[in-house]
Amino acid sequence: MLPATLKYSGIIMEGCNRIAIYEREQGQGRSLNATFLYPSEHSEPRYLPGLLVGFSAEGSQQISCIRTVWEYLGKTPDLRQALAKCGVVDRQQESLPTFVEQGIGNDMTDTEQLFTPRF
């Protein structure tokens, strides 16, 4: 039911050794998200884990929080190549790295008391 391409505008800030991304869907502008990522201690990290808090214009518009993992594209990424790789992953056809699989799981273990990113 969603269009093939969704565009967002927003702002990215760094503070407290975290990356904060605030974005709003262009067009109707009914979805609003805040993503908080943990930067890596490595000079060339592979993945950045974090949380996305927001609501969507579709459905019930309830506030939600999900775990997320962003892939670091480097200091000078090929944006066309990166955008071409975007889309929904068919997990029956493609396998994800273990770190990503664990990092996007939205379950709670017995030892977790808060919904936090997984490293």
Image (tube, rainbow, N blue to C red):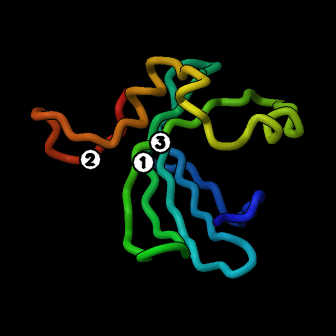
Percent across and percent down for residue 68 are: 47, 42
Residue 112 placement: quadrant: top left
Residue at 59% of width from left, 34% of height from top? 90
Q: Which mark is residue 68?
A: 3
- Residue 8 falls in image quadrant: bottom right
Classify mark 1: residues with Cα within 10 Å, few (<14), some (14-19) or many (20+).
Answer: many
Label 3–label 1 contact, CB within 8 A: yes
Q: Earlier in the sequence, mark 3 or mark 1?
A: 1
Residue 96 lies, in percent from the top left, at 54, 22
Per the model, the C-alpha gap separating discs 2 and 1 is: 9 Å
Quadrant location of the C terminus in the rendered image: top left
Q: Is residue 70 above or below residue 66?
A: above
Element at label 2: loop
Rounded to the nearest angstrom, the CA distance separating label 3 from label 1 is 5 Å
- The image shows residue 81, relative to residue 106, as above or below, that is above
- Verify CB contact (< 8 Å) between mark 2 and mark 3: no
Taking the image as shown, residue 59 lies to the left or right of residue 118, namely: right
- For residue 17, side relative to residue 2 (left or right): left
Most extreme residue toward the left, as rendered?
Answer: 110
* Residue at image mark 1: 51
The residue under the point 26% across, 40% down is: 107
As helix, strand or loop, the secondary structure at mark 1 comes to strand
Tally the marks.
3
Q: Residues within 10 Å of mark 2 (few under 14, many from 20)?
A: some
Amino acid under disc 1: Leu
- Residue 115 in the image: x percent, y percent? 26, 47
Q: Tell me the number on the disc at residue 99.
A: none
Determine the CA span between mark 2 and mark 3: 12 Å
The numbered dot on residue 115 is: 2
Mark 2 or 3, nearer chain start: 3
- For the point 74% across and 27% down, the residue is 74
Say above or below: 64 vs 18.
Answer: below
